[in-house]
Image (cartoon, rainbow, N blue to C red):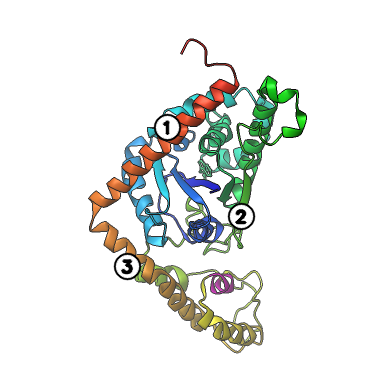
Amino acid sequence: MKRILTGDRPTGRLHLGHYVGSLKNRVRLQDEYECFFIIADLHTLTTKPEKTKELKDNIYQMVLDYLSIGIDPKKSTVYIQSQIPEVAELALIFGNLTTVPRLERMPTLKDVMRDADIQVPSYGLLGYPVLQAADILMVKANLVPVGKDQVSHVEVTREVARDFNRIYRSTSEESKPTSEVSSQVLPIPEVLVGEIPTLPGTDGAVKMSKSAGNVINLSDSPEEVEKKVMGMYTDPTRIHPTDPGHVEGNPVFTYLDAFGADSDKQQITKYQELYRQGQVGDIEVKKYLVKVLNNFLDPIRENRARYERDPELVERILKEGTAKTRTEAQKTLLEVKAAMKLDYFV
Ligand code: TRP
């Protein structure tokens, strides 16, 4: 079975943007792929080395987010990055297969430095994509479902894997170049981005993100959802409900499209027409969106409440997932070192 590896940094609650960008794909692909979901706590050190006290609680909440949206621990593996020491060794090896300017040019580096108010990147922050490559290649993932912002990191992973395979191709394989595929120690992973690669924020910003404070979390209560939606940015050119309105680029309509159930489609189309003609007010459409979002979130809330009542189960899922992943990591590391001829005197 082909494999998936993807995951998140445990910096806070997961939100609707994560859902459409990546989580939805993960849930959908669980039967088709053997899935590994990483809680990338080591990656949080790259911007917030002092915030380690919050990690434990954030990790717990993130597992609840995963389980409540339908990540099924019977099918998929959830694990904690920092409990797999092999990843650090792999990252150290891979750090020699990419260059400093390559990492300095990462578009994410600039963004992260701006958001975290960092003037000079640390060695760790510069190496962020290298650690991510180690995560992905450690389980020999074939597919990486991520949000659009992570695509450039998977590209680095592909380059590292290609370079590794080329440099450390075994000599016996070298003489028979036709067997190129079988000589690969590391598979080259594909990236998969969700149907809605970036969900706008409630404030109309192009992207929903925690740092911008414009998110609706998967764990928000019905009341929080209502409050956030009723305060949402809509069409700035529209002063009165009788003005013709814009549907395109209006986040209220983007959310309706993204989260409306099939049974909502007809009503959504009707609201779009009325809105364009200036025959329905923002308040009415927003109230409808509150209903749509809460219908979407209600089953997620129920699942979350169920798992919240059983913290021991949640802990067991994490422990078993981490143990299973570590076995895979150890296996890959041995293969990697053997390919490098670093397996002397063992
Ligand atoms: N960098 C990812 C993010 O911030 C999290 C992550 C760490 C990840 N390792 C990964 C994602 C490996 C996919 C694969 O969202």
Dividing the picture into quadrants, the one containing residue 160 is: top right
Q: Is residue 298 magenta?
A: no
Disc 3 element = helix
Report whether residue 88 is seen. Answer: yes
Disc 1 element = loop
Report whether residue 241 is seen. Answer: no
For the residues carrying marks 3 and 1, which lies nearer the camera in this image? 3
Disc 2 element = strand
**In this rendering, position of residue 307 left or right of residue 108:** left
Q: Earlier in the sequence, mark 3 or mark 1?
A: 1
What amino acid does circle 1 point to? Pro
**Residue stretch in magenta:** 252-258
Relative to 109, is 27 above or below? Answer: below
Q: Which residue is mark 2?
A: 193
Q: Which residue is mark 3?
A: 302
Alpha carbon of mark 3 to alpha carbon of mark 1: how far? 34 Å
Alpha carbon of mark 2 to alpha carbon of mark 1: how far? 29 Å
What amino acid does circle 2 point to? Val
Relative to 239, is 133 above or below? Answer: above
